[in-house]
Structure formats: C-alpha cells, structure tokens
Image (spheres, rainbow, N blue to C red):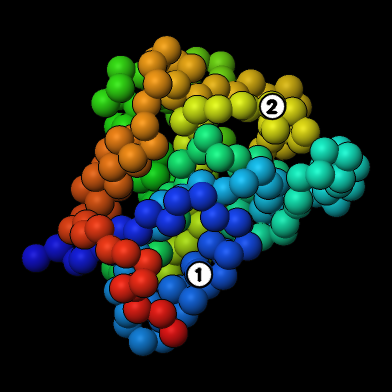
C-alpha cells in the first residue's frame, strides 16, 4: 500500500506563516514519524532569496523592492531570487525520503515532471533546460523550483505561474537571469482557469510520481508538533 500524503489547501497566506508551518511539519515528520504533507497555497506579493543568492543581488533587489513596498525574505531553499504573487500555485511537499528516493537530483526532476504533466493536461508543452531547475514554455519560464532537505525530509518546492500580473518579476533578476521572460498558464492557453482545477491536477501528478496516496485534509487536522 502506498504511503499516505495529506494534501492541504491553505489559500492565500503570508510567506512567513507558511514557512513556519513547513518547519513544524518537517520537525514532526523527522522526530515523531508524523504523516507526510503537501501544502498548496499562494502568497501576497513577496520576493524570497535562496541559498545561492549573491550579496550583490540582495543589495540591488532591496533597493527596488523597498521602493515597491514588496517584502524580501531569506529562506533555506536552493536557488536565488524569485517572486511570488497571488496568481501562482505554490506546492510545498513535506516528504520523508527513504532508500532510493534519497537522490536530490532525481527529486528535482520529479517536481519538474509533475509540472510538465500538469501543463500537458491543458495543452501546453512544458520543457526542461539543462543546468536550470524549473519549466519553460518556449523562451519563457512558467514554473520555478527550489527545495530544502533536513534529515532527508523535503520542504519548500515549486511555484507555477497560473494567472494575474507578472510585473513583480521585473523588480528582480529572477533566478539570477537578467531579462528573464516569464509566462503563465492562463496566458499560454488564452483561457481563464480556476486555481482549484489546476492545483488538483498538479497534486494528482505529484502523488503519482512520488508514489504516495493523496488525501485532502484540512489544515486543522494536520499533526503538528
């Protein structure tokens, strides 16, 4: 029988609140064997900086972000600067990797595969780029990936651009790439898609690819330390 993965829709929540929730779930999974989880959400406008962000990048970003009144937070994930906004779907898998699963490069490719499969469901051809985590549609990036692992328990994850204003990406050099073009699923399909429809497909593909049985669970019912 597949392991159970508790899927929780948090709606739109502040980044720091979801980061704290992830930390608590990781601690429970590592120290008490509590269940694995998949958190789905969006964030109010925010920029996060991963471990590979250079000091010069941070300094330049702070100037433009303070002017735009967009907060900037350092975080534990890999990668560099990225923007999050209400039009995205964030997926944060809290998974206890065991045995052959303990291959972080393979795990990153699994997240990319889940995004590509989701895009295919809506007729959009997503693709990888060698040496750059994430998913592209043509020359534009549609999804970013940055993960953290603590005691072989994963957290952070992926951000898929669904809809809305993408201008926040212009405040930074996303992923350290000046002039990076970004796109969204709505822009590529020309169709208005609900967040619930897309995130359900994304959750289904993630569960299938990581070999877990997904069950939708209210946040109040998650086991927290």
Mark 2 = which residue? 167
User: SS for tag 1?
Assistant: helix
Residue 211 falls in image quadrant: bottom left
Q: Identify the image quadrant of the C terminus.
A: bottom left
Q: As displayed, is residue 180 above or below residue 149?
A: above
Residue 21: numbered disc: 1
Q: Residue at x 53, y 35 (%)?
A: 87
Q: Is residue 224 left or right of residue 218?
A: right
Q: Position of residue 74 (x, y in %)?
A: 72, 59
Front position in the image: 40 or 95: 40
Q: Position of residue 45 (x, y in %)?
A: 66, 43
Q: As displayed, is residue 116 above or below residue 183?
A: below
User: SS for tag 2?
Assistant: helix
Q: Residue at x 14, y 63 (%)?
A: 2
Q: Identify the image quadrant of the N terminus.
A: bottom left
Can I make out residue 95 in this image? no
Residue 140: numbered disc: none
């Amino acid at each position: 029988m597949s392991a159970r993965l508790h899927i929780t829709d948090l709606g739109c929540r502040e980044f720091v609140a979801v980061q704290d929730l992830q930390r608590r779930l990781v601690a429970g999974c590592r120290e008490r064997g509590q269940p694995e989880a998949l958190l789905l959400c969006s964030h109010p406008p925010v920029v996060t900086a991963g471990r590979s962000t250079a000091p010069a990048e941070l300094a330049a970003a702070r100037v433009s972000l303070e002017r735009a009144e967009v907060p900037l937070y350092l975080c534990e994930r890999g990668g560099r600067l990225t923007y999050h906004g209400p039009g995205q779907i964030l997926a944060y898998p809290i998974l206890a990797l065991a045995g052959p699963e303990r291959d972080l490069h393979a795990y990153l490719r699994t997240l990319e595969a889940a995004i590509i499969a989701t895009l295919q469901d809506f007729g959009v051809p997503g693709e990888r780029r060698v040496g750059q985590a994430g998913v592209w549609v043509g020359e534009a990036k549609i999804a970013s990936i940055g993960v953290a692992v603590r005691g072989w328990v994963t957290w952070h994850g992926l951000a898929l651009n669904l809809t809305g204003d993408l201008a926040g990406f212009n405040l930074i050099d996303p992923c350290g790439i000046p002039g990076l073009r970004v796109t969204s699923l709505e822009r590529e399909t020309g169709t208005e898609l609900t967040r619930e429809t897309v995130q359900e497909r994304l959750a289904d593909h993630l569960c299938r690819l990581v070999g877990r049985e997904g069950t939708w669970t209210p946040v109040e019912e998650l086991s927290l330390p």
